[in-house]
Image: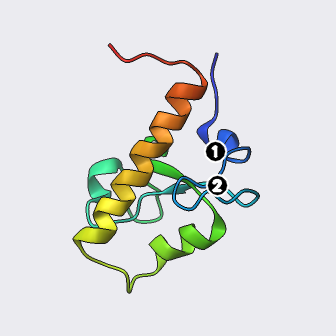
Amino acid sequence: MATNLRKLAQDEPCVRCGSHGTTVLAHYNGDYNHVVGKGMGKKAHDLAGAFLCHKCHLHFDNRESRGINRELEWFKCILSTHYVIMSKYKLEVK
């Protein structure tokens, strides 16, 4: 069964703050974006995305919030999103 990660985000709470209603799949845009496929006019791969509400998405899009803490928070949100997807759909990694 093929599932679109962007559509899955609509029914999920934000993995950063827990709010409902405005969640989207926010694509990673940090210091290592070239590693996950981001380029000029091209978003990072959907696997490098996190279920974030509008407010949290803006937090990561704000260029003033830079540094290792922002990167770690991004990665935490991406991993939390993967955990939600794998738990909900009972996916296994071997």
Q: Relative to 1, is 41 above or below? A: below
Query: Horizontally, is 7 left or right of 33 in the view?
Result: right
Q: Which residue is mark 1?
A: 6
Kindly state the secondary structure of the residue where label 2 is placed: strand
User: Which mark, by number, is residue 24?
Assistant: 2
Q: What residue appears at the point 29 percent right and 60 percent down from the top-left corner? A: 72
Q: Position of residue 18 (x, y in %)?
A: 61, 56
Give the total of numbered labels.
Answer: 2
Residue 62 seen in this snapshot: yes
Q: Relative to 55, is 44 above or below? A: above
Q: Position of residue 82 (x, y in %)?
A: 46, 37
Categorize mark 2 by other alpha carbons within 10 Å: few (<14), some (14-19), many (20+).
Answer: many
Identity of the residue furthest to the left in this view: 68
Position of the C terminus by quadrant: top left
* Model colouring: rainbow
Identity of the residue furthest to the front in this view: 18
Q: Nearer the viewer, residue 27 or 89?
A: 89
Q: Position of residue 84 (x, y in %)?
A: 53, 36
Q: Quadrant of residue 34?
A: bottom left
Identity of the residue furthest to the top in this view: 94
Kindly state the secondary structure of the residue where label 1 is placed: helix
Residue 38 seen in this snapshot: no
Task: Look at label 1 and name its amino acid.
Answer: Arg
Tag 1 or tag 2, which sits nearer the N-term?
A: 1
Q: Relative to 71, is 82 above or below? A: above
Position of the N terminus by quadrant: top right
User: Which mark, by number, is residue 84?
Assistant: none
Q: What residue appears at the point 55 percent right and 67 percent down from the top-left corner? A: 57
Q: What residue appears at the point 54 percent right and 52 percent down from the top-left corner? A: 15
